[in-house]
Image (cartoon, grey):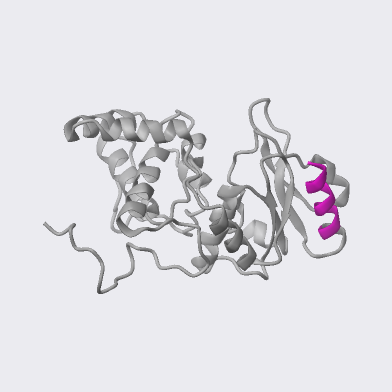
């Protein structure tokens, strides 16, 4: 924690950045995002086991970008999100200084986004928690009809508050499909069909882009395991295309690009 505060003081007082996005005290169970613009506030920065929120969600917010060049305290999931956003032309080296965080509160200094990519590739691996991986495998073992019934029951409880969308760094569209009403692509009411269409559409839009941080599931006020949908599809993409999102600055999404040697075993 002291290493983070020291680095934050260095870059903020040195004029390298105008704001530092990090974690501060929140509830006993969770830390919350804070935006440090004054050196006097640096002591508010913390980093411990409660710091799970994916702070990369703020990097594309117009009101945050308007503050000036940003520094961000970045865990592994945040690092992968930064790379994915950069690959989608949402971030450049001119926009951000990345302060990598280790599990013990140490700091990794990155000269640029290429250095972030090199680090993430060297530390390759999934961000999915063991308990989530076990739940995905358990659901996968169910017959098709039982899997369908399981998700119908889970998603029936959704109130369409869109907390999952608000928490996801990859949901940065200025106008979401659910807000389009000419035509009305997704039913607005929170009912059986509207809930299914919303969550299936969301999962498909994140396929090949999800960095497996699980933030959508943590953000759900009802505790619905919606993060398992995108994590399952991320695993399928890795198996089918040998691909993980958030691992490179220059990428082509496997579902929006074509190569002559692509497998065609999905065609029935």
Q: Nearer the viewer, residue 201 or 260?
A: 260
Give the percent coordinates (x, y) of residue 204.
33, 52
Residue 209 among those drawn in magenta: no
Rendered position, 77 above or below 49: below
43 left or right, relative to 128? right
Give the percent coordinates (x, y) of residue 84.
51, 60
Residue 5 among those drawn in magenta: yes
* Magenta segment: 1-11
Q: Nearer the viewer, residue 243 or 71?
A: 243
Query: At 18% across and 32% down in the image, what residue appears?
Result: 143
| Residue extending furthest toward the bottom | 260
Give the percent coordinates (x, y) of residue 16.
80, 65
Query: At 82% across and 59% down in the image, what residue appears?
Result: 11
Q: Nearer the viewer, residue 266 or 16?
A: 266
Give the quadrant of the N terminus. top right
**Residue 159 visible here:** no
Instruction: Tell how many labels.
Output: 0
């Amino acid at each position: 924690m002291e290493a983070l505060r020291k680095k934050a003081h260095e870059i903020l007082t040195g004029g390298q950045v105008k704001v530092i996005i990090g974690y501060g005290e929140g509830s006993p169970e969770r830390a919350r995002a804070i935006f440090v613009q004054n050196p006097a506030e640096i002591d508010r920065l913390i980093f411990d086991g409660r710091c799970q929120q994916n702070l990369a969600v703020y990097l594309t917010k117009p009101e945050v970008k308007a503050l000036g060049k940003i520094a961000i305290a970045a865990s592994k999931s945040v690092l992968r999100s930064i790379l994915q956003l950069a690959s989608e032309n949402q971030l450049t080296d001119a926009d951000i200084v990345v302060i990598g965080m280790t599990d013990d509160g140490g700091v990794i200094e990155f000269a640029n986004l290429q250095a972030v990519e090199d680090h993430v590739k060297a530390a390759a691996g999934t961000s999915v928690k063991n308990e989530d991986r076990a739940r995905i495998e358990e659901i996968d073992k169910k017959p098709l009809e039982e899997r369908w019934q399981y998700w119908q029951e889970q998603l029936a409880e959704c109130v369409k508050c869109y907390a999952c969308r608000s928490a996801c760094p990859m949901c940065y569209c200025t106008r979401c499909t659910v807000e389009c009403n000419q035509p009305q692509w997704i039913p607005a009411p929170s009912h059986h069909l509207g809930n299914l269409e919303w969550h299936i559409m969301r999962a498909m839009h994140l396929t090949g882009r999800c960095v497996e941080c699980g933030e959508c599931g943590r953000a759900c006020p009802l505790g619905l395991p919606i993060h398992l949908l995108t994590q399952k599809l991320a695993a399928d993409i890795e198996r089918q295309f040998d691909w993980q999102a958030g691992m490179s600055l220059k990428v082509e999404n496997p579902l929006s690009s074509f190569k002559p040697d692509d497998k065609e075993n999905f065609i029935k």
